[in-house]
Image: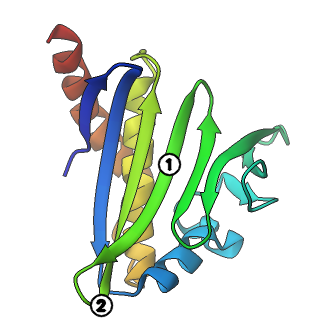
Amino acid sequence: MLSKIYENELGFTAEFKFTYDISTGKLWNALVNNENFKFWMDHLEITDLCKGGNINFHYNDGSGKVEKLMITDYVDGKVLQFDWGMDTVRFEISAHSSTGSQLLLTEFLKEITDHTPKDLAGWHVCLLRFQDFMKSENHVKSEEEWEKWYCEYKVLVQRLIRG
């Protein structure tokens, strides 16, 4: 399912929602554990998990280049928000049903650019990989999936711009 994207007073918002049949605590621990990033977003490494802390973004292109991303909001077990270039990414975990949980990823976009569909497709694939990781499965082939979702998000973003 595509993310929902809508315009707001500060730019645009993209929302991805996934539900899980596990507790919020288990979901949170899976999300913020550096060892787990290799399964769904191997560019990230949390170096200081707190508001004002840092997440390293490793380019993984052989250059050794690392970009520091500031954690702008943090509530243990519930919220992890950080700078993402000129934009902001926010993960929120909440209870869903009596034993399940929901993961909401929100990307706050200051503007729509040519890179926006690529970014959205990337987050979509990362979340599908995270979902596979949580189920101990491995269905998502990142490059193939990214191409598919990039085409979908390109159309969605073009419709949004045209109004």
Q: Which residue is mark 2?
A: 99
Q: Is residue 76 left or right of residue 63?
A: left
- Residue 135's image quarter? bottom left
Mark 1 → mark 2, Cα distance in angstroms: 23 Å
Q: What residue appears at the point 69 percent right and 74 percent down from the top-left corner?
A: 35
Task: From the top left corner, tell me how far across and down residue 109 is, in percent.
Answer: 44, 27
Task: From the top left corner, tell me how far across and down residue 80 is, in percent.
Answer: 58, 57
Q: What amino acid is found at the position of numbered circle 1 in the picture? A: Arg
Q: What residue appears at the point 74 percent right and 59 percent down from the top-left corner?
A: 50
Q: Is residue 94 left or right of residue 50?
A: left
Q: Nearer the viewer, residue 129 or 76?
A: 76
Task: Specify few, some or many for label 1: CA neighbours under 10 Å numbering under 14, 14-19, or 20 or more.
Answer: many
Work out which residue is located at the far right of the displayed protein and give it. Answer: 64
Query: Does the image show residue 73?
Result: yes
Q: Determine whether 13 is above or below 17 in the image.
A: above
Query: Upstream in the sequence, badge 1 or badge 2?
Result: 1
Query: Does the image show residue 141?
Result: no
Q: Nearer the viewer, residue 14 or 128?
A: 14
Task: From the top left corner, tell me how far across and down residue 69 is, in percent.
Answer: 72, 41
Task: From the top left corner, tell me how far across and down residue 23 is, in percent.
Answer: 40, 87
Q: Nearer the viewer, residue 67 or 12?
A: 12
Q: Quadrant of the C terminus?
A: top left
Work out which residue is located at the far bottom of the displayed protein and give it. Answer: 99
Q: Nearer the viewer, residue 93 or 135?
A: 93
Q: Which residue is mark 1?
A: 90
Q: What residue appears at the point 36 percent right and 49 percent down from the top-left corner?
A: 124
- Residue 75's image quarter? bottom right
Q: What amino acid is found at the position of numbered circle 2 in the picture? A: Thr
Q: What residue appears at the point 29 percent right and 41 percent down from the top-left corner?
A: 149
